[in-house]
Amino acid sequence: WYFGKIGRKDAEKRLLAPGLNVGTFVVRDGEANPGTYSLSVRDYDTQKGDHVKHYKIRKLDDDRGYYIAQRSPFQNLEMLVRHYQSQADGLCVRLTTSCPKENPNTGGLSKDAWEIDRSSLTLEQKLGAGQFGEVWKGMWHGKTPVAVKTLKPGTMTPSAFLAEANIMKKLRHEKLVQLFAVCTDKEPIYIVTELMVHGSLLDFLKDGDGKHLKLPQLVDMGAQIASGMGFLESHNYVHRDLAARNVLVGHNNICKVADFGLARMIEDSEYTARQGTKFPIKWTAPEAASYGRFTIKSDVWSYGVLLTELVTYGRTPYPGMTNAEVLEQVERGYRMPKMANCTDSLYQTMLSCWNKDPQSRPTFDFLHSYMDDYFVSTEPNYKEAF
């Protein structure tokens, strides 16, 4: 039940996840003062619906215990939690179960064995297939659940892939899918990553639980993606293929950016020739599509397109237009019109990502803070249209 340094907002997001009951709780570090704690618990009433209450856990003056109500001090946090699990005793509700945790990333599967033996992997269930390979749910040594991407032979040379993968494995952030290990001894190359239970954001929005989400949840997912991309931005790393199909979804609508950097190593001529049928022209900034200038600013353009995928529940961008038409029209200044279920302010954000001048597009750092505070700063009076 102890979640460490997670903020009030993150606690609320986790506790309001579908399927959790009233009384589900977390204990977390207090945000105002180090050494203090907060208890966050899921509650329900007919006026507010599902919501989260927060209680300060205070320290006794002599550091010999903790209390929420002064009349009931406890020697340690365990005793405090046990007490409120047995009775509400002044809280809004009795504590029931602790909030489920995302399995923590262990960095790599084993200390130095970056290249692992493919016999240690069991591929159990095919989760999806793309133009360059398949994704499987698998087990490592029969006990650690992982995702395994198998690359079609000829997609990229093992040596080129290994060089890039060595950079990719150092990029660690809570909103990036963690790369665990690789198998490059022969083809197909295996890429082993953390497993995200709901698969790609695109499938989640079109056919999964995502198709029932409302704008606040969609904006929150956009904020998470901008956070992961902001980390790449701060490390001068370019994704090159940001789209809903390359974002993965875990429990509680947690989003993580996947497949960063892979596009650079693909050797398929239908992809590398920007006129090729496999090139993702509808997500690609004009300077990248026409001149091959891929930068973090071309990723920002792609992020604007990804926002359209979010608010349309996975609709293909530029509906009814061919790749050639998109390339020509965008070059002339055409931009996708505002979609239904999209606020004016969110549409203005998309347009800023699609500025013809790459340097005039916002940073991911800005986009993250803007999206994270969207319903506080930009749309405080937003009401869902019924």
Image (tube, rainbow, N blue to C red):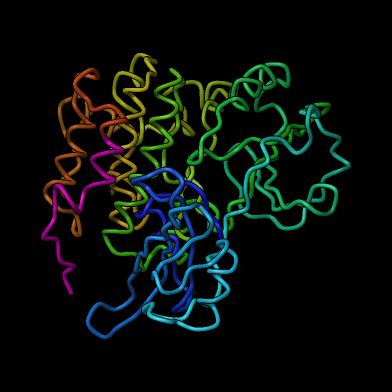
| Residue 337 sits in quarter | top left
Task: Tell me which residue sits at (44%, 66%) in the image.
Answer: 17
Residue 249 image position (x, y, % from top left): 50, 53
Task: Tell me which residue sits at (25%, 77%) in the image.
Answer: 48
Q: Nearer the viewer, residue 107 or 43?
A: 43
Looking at the image, residue 267 sits to the left or right of residue 241; the answer is right
Residue 361 image position (x, y, % from top left): 22, 25
Q: Is residue 380 magenta?
A: yes
Residue 10 image position (x, y, % from top left): 40, 53
Q: Quadrant of the N terminus?
A: bottom right
| Residue 124 sits in quarter | bottom right
Q: Nearer the viewer, residue 32 or 299?
A: 32
Q: Is residue 85 magenta?
A: no
Q: Nearer the viewer, residue 304 or 283?
A: 304
Looking at the image, residue 63 sits to the left or right of residue 282; the answer is right
Looking at the image, residue 361 sits to the left or right of residue 110; the answer is left
* Up-down relation of residue 201 to residue 69 (above or below): above
Task: Tell me which residue sits at (37%, 15%) in the image.
Answer: 293
* Up-down relation of residue 305 to residue 216 (above or below): above
Residue 76 image position (x, y, % from top left): 57, 61
Task: Tell me which residue sits at (32%, 39%) in the image.
Answer: 322
Report the span colored magenta. 367-386
Residue lying at the far right in this picture: please name it.
119
How many numbered marks have been drawn onto this rendered protein structure? 0
Q: Quadrant of the C terminus?
A: bottom left
